[in-house]
Structure formats: C-alpha cells, structure tokens
Image (spheres, rainbow, N blue to C red):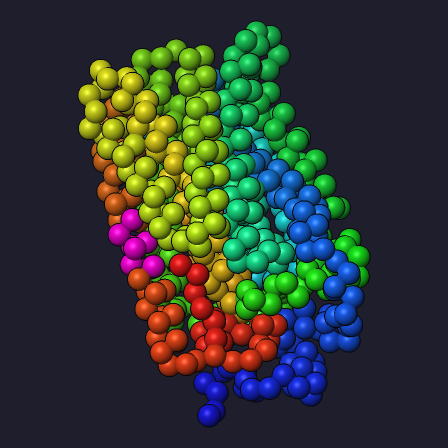
Amino acid sequence: MNPEPGKQPIPTDMDLETKNNLISTGNADAALDFLRSEDSAEISEVDEKALVRKIDWMIMPLMWAAYNLQYLDKVLINYASVMGLLSDTNMHTDQFSNLTLAFYVTYLFFELPTGFLMQRLPTAKYLGLNVALWGLMTTLNCTAKNFPGLMVLRVLLGCFESAIAPALILITSMWYKRDEQPKRMGIWYLGTGTASIMGALVAYGLLFYTSNAFKPWQIMFLIFGLITIAVGISITIFLPDNPMTSRLGHSEKLLAIERLRENQTGIENKHFKRSQFVEIFADPQTYLIAIIVTAMDVPNAAMSSFTSLIIKNFGYTTKQTELLNLPNGAVSIVSILAVSWAAGRYNQRCLCVVASLSAGLLGGCLLAFAPRSNQSAQLAGNYLTQCTGSALPIMYSLAGANVAGHTKKVSMNAVLLMAFCLGNILGPLTFRTEDEPDYVPAKIAIVATLAVAIVFTLGLRGYYVWENSRREKAGEGRGEVEFWDLTDRENTGFRYAL
C-alpha cells in the first residue's frame, strides 16, 4: 500500500537497513540513533525504581520552581492591586483588566514560534533563557510609574512566559511513562498553589512596610524578579535537555530510554515535519482539547487576577484580604495532588478532569447565586473555584500521552497553550467597571464556561473509547516502531489513554 502524500513510507520490519535509513534521513527519533550501536545487556544492572527516583530529583525541583515562579510572577499584579498599585499608577479597573489581557494576547501569538524554536534548540537551555528574561521583566515592574509602562512589561512578560508550559510538557514526556506522567505534571503544576501561598504571605508582610523609599508592591516585584533570574540561570546549567545528554551513567541512559518504548510517543526529533504539523488540524482531538481548555480557563483568568478584588468587596480590609488569599493556594494544592494521583492510579484522565471542573462549577454557582450578605458561602465559592486549575495538568498529560510524533507533539502543545491563552483573554473581559462591586455577569460566565468544558470532556473521552475500539476490531497494529517518530494516527498500534 502506498503511503499518503507527504508522509514517510513505513516498513513492516525493523531491520538494520531500515533503522539506518530512518536515522540518516532524520525521520527517526533521537533515541533510535542513540540505541543503534548500544549493548542493551547493561540495562539489567540498573534498578528502575532507583533510576526513576534519581530522575525525579534531577529534574522535578527545577521544573516546580520554574512553574511556581511563572504563575507567581504573572499574578503578582493581583496582590499589588490592593497594595496601592492602581492609585499609584492612576489606573482604573478596565485598564487593570487590559494588563491581564495584554499578557495573554502576547502569550498566544508567541506559542507557535516558541514551539518551533523549542524543536530546533536544546529544550532546557531555551527554557532557562526565557525564565531569566521574564524574571528581568518582573524586576522592572518596580520602576513602572504609569499604565503604559506596565503595559509594555506585561507584553514582554507574556512573550517569555509562553515557553514554560510547552517546555515542561515536552520534558515530562521525555522522561516518564504514560502512567507516571499525570503525577509528575501534577508535581510541577503544584507551583500554582505554592505560588498563591507565597505571594499572599509576602504581600501581607509588606503591608507592614512603612518606609517612603519604595512602595510595598515595588519591593514585591523586585524580590520575586531577582529570584526568577537566579532560577533561570540554574535551569540553563543543571536541567538536562534530554536523557541522551543527561548526567546519568551510560547504562542508566539506556534504561531511561528503553523504559519509554511502551509510550510509543518517542523522545525527541529536531527535524520539523510538515506532514505532522498538518495532521494536527485533521485530528478531532485537537479541536475537542482546544474547546475544553478554552472554556475551563475563562474562570482561571478571572480568579487568578481578580480574587483579591472579589474578596475585598466582601467587606474585608486589605490585610484581611491578603490573609484570606492563603486558602486559595491550599485548596489548589490539595485538589492538584488528589486529581493527579487519581489520574495516574486509575488511568482515567478525562473523568478526573470532570471531577475537578464539577467542584469549580459548584464554587461558581455559590459566587453567582449566593446572597452577597452570606460571606461564608461567597468565600466557599471563591475557594472551590480554585479546584478548576487542577484539571489543567491532566489536560497537559492527555496531550503528552495521546499525541505522538515530535513535530505533532510540539504543535499540539502550542495549540493547547493557545487555547489556554484564549480562555485567559476572555476571562478578564467579563469583569467590567460598570459591574462593580459584585461582578455578577462575570460569575455567571464562570458557571457557563465550566459547564461547557465538562460536556466536551465527556465527548473527548467518548472519542478515545470509540477510536481504540475501532483499532482493536480492525486488528490494527505494527511491530517495533516506538522510536520511528510516527504520529498516533500513523502508528495504528497506538492506543489512546482515557
């Protein structure tokens, strides 16, 4: 049978000639080139559990630190909004909303370019450079005197932060089996919860600062900006680009690669394949994932940027507001740990997404429909909406587990993050000055978008079940093709994680 136009011919037996041809033409995964002349007998000398622990300690702390700081640096403006930022820079609510909007617009437009650069350049080095640069932008916020100055810095912040999530998804899929990925993505995604706690505590402490040399919000931007620059430099030095070039011993590298055969998603290929890029837009899961992520991230933007203003409008003082932000981080951490553990333990990613979105939906209903006089119900609703964020790392793990072919993976990550940006662009637009102080239309938007996300998540799961069943009935499958850099649609032996 002739291959489709633009796609590589797929032989049925992995003989030496086939292997060498795939490598020489750049069609194979980099892992296949590494394994070509290696003796796999050494693998038996390495304990896999010990190796996984070593990998965890080698990459997870840096990945968590990067994601923690990217979330913290972009929401520092949330804490600053009740620390005098708006009055000091003569901003009103609509301009404040536009700062959030500008960040995500830039983030969206840079996703495809950053995905292309990530495939061509060493992944960890590229990530580290971007972390250091967005740290510089965060630091410079302390010098901003007005809305235009803050707008320029937010635009540049979005440009550099656009690399973080696709890079971490890619790195996680390079090192871990499919059933290990939800927990690891959950670990680095915990940065959203820990960042909320860190930001609230620092913001609260700075409210006691009384000197006239700097404003409290200026010191906050300065502290976290410098920390971010230091972490970016550390990532560039210490985070390996892939298993083949890591600090692992030779036999450990072999096992780190061989254990990922069952994923059938490969590790890395630096050659851009147009056919794989085009395939993204012919794949139904692309559109379903994009709709889900867009819908679920409308509340994300609303709550990450406006939580402080919402809580303060319940009638609390500025200091009480910063303290009441602490449970947001705690709820986020607990929900991320629970959902990512369940997704890995039971291999039911879509159902776990539905569970976390349902908790957020309940929170949205309390915010929108509970009487304003009932502060307890309003606060409970605010905290429950934080559960929504725990669905995002599971969506990341779906993209990492169910998309094969390196160009297609990078492109899917870009599409996923563009959908994330679109949701975060729409979210702030629901908070309008004329709706102050209750923002009822914005709260109703939270309810509606979460309901849409739940319905489409169930639809995505149904598609995976149908496609797996169709392939099983047709008896589709191939032999040793794990490192051929085939897409999930080219490799008919591929089965989708639910």
Looking at the image, residue 470 sits to the left or right of residue 169; the answer is left
Percent of width and height locating residue 125? 69, 51
Q: Is residue 27 above or below residue 158?
A: below
* 326 left or right of 470 in image: right
Q: Main secondary structure of the magenta part?
A: helix
Q: What is the quadrant of the C terminus in the image? A: bottom left
Q: Toward the viewer: 206 or 263?
A: 263
Compared across the picture, whether 76 is left or right of 21 comes to left
Question: Is residue 364 inside the magenta stretch?
Answer: no
Is residue 455 magenta-colored?
A: yes
The x, y position of residue 406, in whole percent, is 56, 66
Identify the residue shown where x is 31% and y is 62%. 462
- Residue 368 drawn above or below residue 87: below
Residue drawn at x 25%, y 45% is: 451
Q: Which residue does the image show at 55% across and 14% down from the upper left?
A: 205
Q: Position of residue 197 (x, y in %)?
A: 51, 25
Query: Would residue 338 be visible to someone looking at this image?
Result: yes
Magenta segment:
454-461
Q: Nearer the viewer, residue 182 or 167?
A: 182
Rendered image quadrant of residue 36: bottom right
Residue in the foreground of this view, choosing between 77 and 86: 77
What residue sits 28% from the left and 17% below the top? Answer: 375
